[in-house]
Image (cartoon, rainbow, N blue to C red):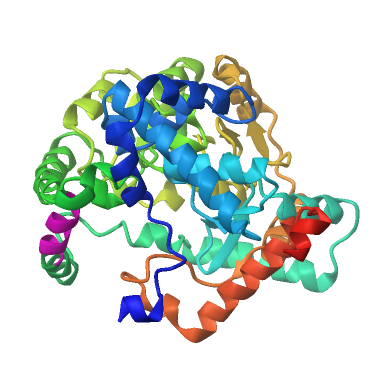
Amino acid sequence: MIARTLSFDQVHDLSGFLREFVPNADLDKCRASLKMFEEMRDCETLNTMVRADRIIGSYSHERVIRVLAGIVYFWKRTLTHIRPDVVIGEVACATEWIAWVLARRMGIPFLIPYPTPVTNRFFFIEEPKGAWTRMQNNFDECIRRRLTSQEAQIAESFVMDFRANKSKPLFLKWSERSPLNPNLHGLWRRIGRIPFRIQSYIESGPYEVGSYHGTPPWRPMWQDLMQICRYAYCESTLFEHNVPQGPFIYFPLHVQPEFTTDVRAPSLTNQIAVIENISRSVPITHHVIVKEHPGMSGERKPSYYQQLRSLHNVRLISCSVDSHELIKHADAVVTITGSTAWEAILYEKPVIALGPLCYGFCDLIYGCKDIAALSHYIEKALNSHRPNHNVLLKYVWSFLDTAYELQWGDPIRMPHICESSNVRKIAQAIISESIFRAAPRPPELIMN
């Protein structure tokens, strides 16, 4: 049936291509190809991309060279052949990152879907570091004028509702389930996929570099068991479970490996080193409160937390503690790229961002690009910060007026995403964003 309907004629199989390319690839030619790719100097180094990739990053050096050369060749050939009007990809791995670079060089708009820190709100960023030009343009326009009474009321209502209901983005709610309370229905579905996972891994596992099928299918089951054990141990011995008293700076741990950290802030992936710098930079009167991310419950080894606990002014807080309460009691918030920055802004707390934030373009955020200057920014946040409610309302209105109102996520976990009304919203958002980003094309390409 698939052959008769030609359903897969427009499917370009990366793993199948790599399965043929990699074993016979000449290493010197691969190095020369990748050298030419990097010489453009319009992107991060390929080694940065490899370090951000949970699959390719585990390969030997020579295999990395061959696989990357194959990926570059695959995308050059594919994009040249089909010449799409737009590419949509998450840039969550080296494969997609390379595609983004090549598409940009060819003048093809690349939409990176990105869920906002607000449920049912969504936007596209322009580059891996997270620029959100449409909101910034909207905000700049709002700064030059007064909000209408209706716009101000909508923004004010949003802020008040956020604080009253302690709102959290939907992608965080999915991760808040304790490992000791597993989703049995989801576990049963995963067990049902084991035969397929084993078959796909045997056939092309080492070449499935753009999906989870590139990892051994038995590894997740072992990881789940270890996650339960680590979670139980750390919750009972290493974490505090109450909002601390006394002055403190709040730093939320980020999920890793993850696009938001490994791709958008590749120089800040060592969060232990980041926390050590925060620990050295805060006043002697303050603690540094570090809260685990719900999505990492039981994922990190106890030694990771013990290393943090060895710092005299650092205290570890369980992921079960409400982040809203921590933000409200904190004197300042430090983050890399996390959604905690957005939450702290809505509470009118000083926020220091060490990495690039999609919405980090206004004076409500202290952007610290050099961690050596962190003590200066902390002093400024503690002693000079003055909330500006008028700017906050313009900031919120710019967000609400720009972000698309739709649902985006995993349709297996959230099947309602595939309802026709939501699919139409997604299609309209893609069309709108494509028009906004469209670069002038040569006449002959437009004709083709």
Q: Count the marks: how many?
A: 0
Q: Residue at x 77, y 65 (%)?
A: 447
Residue 339 point in image, percent of width and height:
50, 48
Quadrant (top left/top right/bottom left/bottom right) for the N terminus: bottom left
Residue 258 point in image, percent of width and height:
39, 42
Q: Main secondary structure of the magenta part?
A: helix
- Which residue is farthest bottom? 420
Q: Residue at x 57, y 18 (%)?
A: 375
State whether residue 240 is above or below residue 113.
Answer: above
Residue 319 shows up from this direction:
no
Q: Nearer the viewer, residue 102 or 177?
A: 102
- Which residue is farthest right? 145
Residue 58 point in image, percent of width and height:
26, 31
State whether residue 419 is above or below residue 138.
Answer: below
Residue 342 shows up from this direction:
yes
Residue 30 lies in quadrant: top left
Taking 166 as reference, is 66 left or right? left
Q: Residue at x 45, y 15 (%)?
A: 280
Residue 157 lies in quadrant: bottom right
Q: Which residues are magenta?
A: 193-201
Is 194 covered by the magenta stretch?
A: yes
Is 306 covered by the magenta stretch?
A: no
Taking 433 as reference, is 22 left or right? left
Q: Nearer the viewer, residue 331 or 13?
A: 13
Q: Nearer the viewer, residue 33 or 48?
A: 33
Taking 144 as reference, is 313 left or right? left
Quadrant (top left/top right/bottom left/bottom right) for the C terminus: bottom right
